[in-house]
Image (spheres, helix red, strand yellow):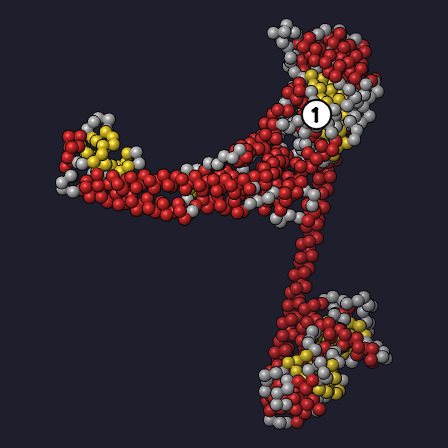
Amino acid sequence: MDQKALKVLEYDKIIKMLDERSVSELGRALTGMLVPSTDLHEVEYRLKETTDAAAFLWRKGSPPFGGVHDIRSSLKRIELGATLSIPELLRIGDMLRCCRILKQYLTNDVPSEWEGNLALELGRQITPSREVEEAISHAIISEEEISDHASPTLASIRRSIRQKQDSIKDKLNAIIRSAEFKKYMQDAVVTMRGDRYVIPVKQEYKALVPGLIHDMSASGATVFIEPLSVVETNNEIKALLIREQQEIERILAELTGKVAEIKDLLKANVDIVARLDFMFAKAKLSRDLDCICPKLSASRAIKILQGRHPLLDRKRVVPIDIELGYGFSTLVITGPNTGGKTVTLKTVGLFVLMLQAGLHVPVKEGSEFGLFGSVFADIGDEQSIEQSLSTFSSHMKNIVRILAEADESSLVLFDELGAGTDPTEGAALAIAILEGLTQRGIRTIATTHYSELKIFAMTRERVQNACCEFDVETLRPTYRLLVGVPGKSNAFAISEKLGLGKDVIERAKGYLTQDNLRFEDVLSDIEKNRIESRKEREQAEDLRRQIEALRQETEKEKQKIARERDQIIAKAKEEARALVREARREAEELLERLKELEKKGIEQSMKELQEARAGVRRLDHLEASYTDGFGIRSAYAEPPKDLKPGESVMLLNLNQKATVLDEPDGDGQVLVQAGIMKIKVHVSQLSRVDEQKNALEKMQHVRTAGVKASPIGLELDLRGLNVEEALDRVDKYLDDAVIAGLHEVTLIHGKGTGTLRKAISEHLRRHQHVKSFRLGKYGEGETGVTVVSLG
């Protein structure tokens, strides 16, 4: 890739932004070596790295890179047989901990569809060593201190040192506080000189304190004496300190040996972490600049939608749409100064460099890029005083080099082609250069002020015009790029706005040729039509937004109506349930009174009791039906007409037979009786019952509906109950079973003494719902259960 183009297009600033998002020197080393590639497979792999790392950022946040160190120099020292220092071992421990946590971040809680994610694959390749990590953290407290727990020997030595130090301090404190020596002391403190405990004695009394002089103050007024009584103990402490250092060196050598055993593992981990740091730096840049991975094209074409220069303020930069290579290979951009022509050139060139380096670019979906073998750019003022080159000469020197080195795989960018010399000759040179590049099929974008190049672009195949829009009313560029439209010279309009006299402007127009005037008039018409077209599009877009707002408002109203309808239905259901509950309460009171009659042994009460129980069960059935299907017609049928009292009808929403009591009123409400319940329903919820239908078929239909509405088990467990309680439960259960449409049920009474089984058998013989019964067979519970057939 052309180094001059990399500099002119400010590729180095993108690398700096990438470098700022790396967390370690390992990642920054890879960032510094990043250059655009021309190999399609390598570019695809680089882009996939960025995309896969970005997926982790969006799902799990930033990766835990805390503790990353470049430990390669320490690993090299291990290979040479050196013992690592405390700081080196600490950094290796940090690196091992970082690798372990990073592996958990990359491999835990990952969607199954992420198989093949490059960051995930690298995470799986990380090999932690918890044993070495814990050995280092257990032994080392900080960069200057080894823990007492590093070894039993070290703990014992340090314990002895502390004991002897305490002994010396006690002896010295006794001396400096004693009445005999107190007057000799400069200060009543114990201090140290050269790892030995001493006391400060006034210079004039040094001969009165027997001991070794170790130091003297700067003024000479104080001497530091080690009393003879502690010399031996100080010597013992010195020996213990030497032993402590030897034990520390042994511990460091032991830890170094543990690290040496996994040095190959550590080297691999360092390379993986470096790659991951680099990948996530690219992903962070993509996230921060709101980038995407555009489509790669096999052709040398560029299609940019809403592209934003990554080095400009995102809030102020105006996105551009531009394409090259679709039907034309050369694009000529015209427009006023400060209109955005140079920024457009740099945006296109920088996007190509970033993409081929494996970086996402700030564009919208639908953008597409081909790969280029090289990018050449002649942008900016390159006047050289030292080399005595004018602006034109320096540009032409660069252009000559580009023409010599560029081939059909290149992208060439020219800013103000032909400027800096006589306009006529400059325009002719520019046309000749662009024509030569077009004939060679080289993708080229050039900016210019020359009208001749506009005509050239309009009259040549594979050459297209574009312009940077300018608002004459405000005298400001809009920074929008319009492909396919040549730019109009606005010199006269701008001058008039700034106050130049009309006579001067008209005189200036008189110097223009008729061809130039006609050309400018055509451009004016094109510009006028384009502005009108844009206004119409904006009006159409406003109308579309208004229609969308109305649609959303209508949808909200529909939802509101639906909610109100549901609330009305729910309220009706609740009222229906309340009515049924009240009827049940009254029926239960009746049931209790009948039970009292049953206890008195009145035969007639048995029949009344069973009828009352059946009525209560039917109420349960009614309540469930109200809850599940209130107000809903189960199937479409023509509402019955001319209903008369005494006719049989079916309540469709309850699947219950009823008898008409009164003719329908004016609102279509009919009073019917279903069992013991008298209710009013609308005629649309009724259908006539054909009394001639097969009775068996009708019974089967009712039973099937009953099973759906009233869930009941096929077994009743009576174990642990006395006879009276059990028989009461049996009666209720058999009533429920009949209403639910069950044909066979099982009563579990257990084997025991047989008393409960006999009582149940006697009761079943005279029960009106029991068709037959028998004891259980082998596998059914044998004599512990009774199987009852219901008729």
Quick check: 704 above or below 271?
Answer: below
Quick check: 94 above or below 663?
Answer: above
The residue that label 1 is drawn on is 348
Q: Residue at x 80, y 72 (%)?
A: 687
Quick check: 666 above or below 563?
Answer: below
Q: Position of residue 551 (x, y in %)?
A: 72, 46
Q: Nearer the viewer, residue 449 or 496?
A: 449
Quarter of the image that includes the C terminus: bottom right
**In the structure shown, which secondary structural element does the residue marked by tag 1 occupy?**
helix
Quick check: 470 above or below 560?
Answer: above
Q: Quadrant of residue 789?
A: bottom right
Q: Is residue 613 left or right of residue 442?
A: left
Q: Is residue 701 left or right of residue 612?
A: right
Q: Residue at x 61, y 81 (%)?
A: 588
Q: Position of residue 23 (x, y in %)?
A: 55, 34
Q: Residue at x 71, y 39 (%)?
A: 545
Q: Nearer the viewer, residue 474 or 439?
A: 439
Q: Position of residue 177 (x, y in %)?
A: 18, 42
Whether residue 532 is visible to the viewer of this picture, yes or no, is no
Q: Residue at x 76, y 20 (%)?
A: 444
Q: Position of residue 531 (x, y in %)?
A: 74, 26
Amino acid type, callout 1? Val
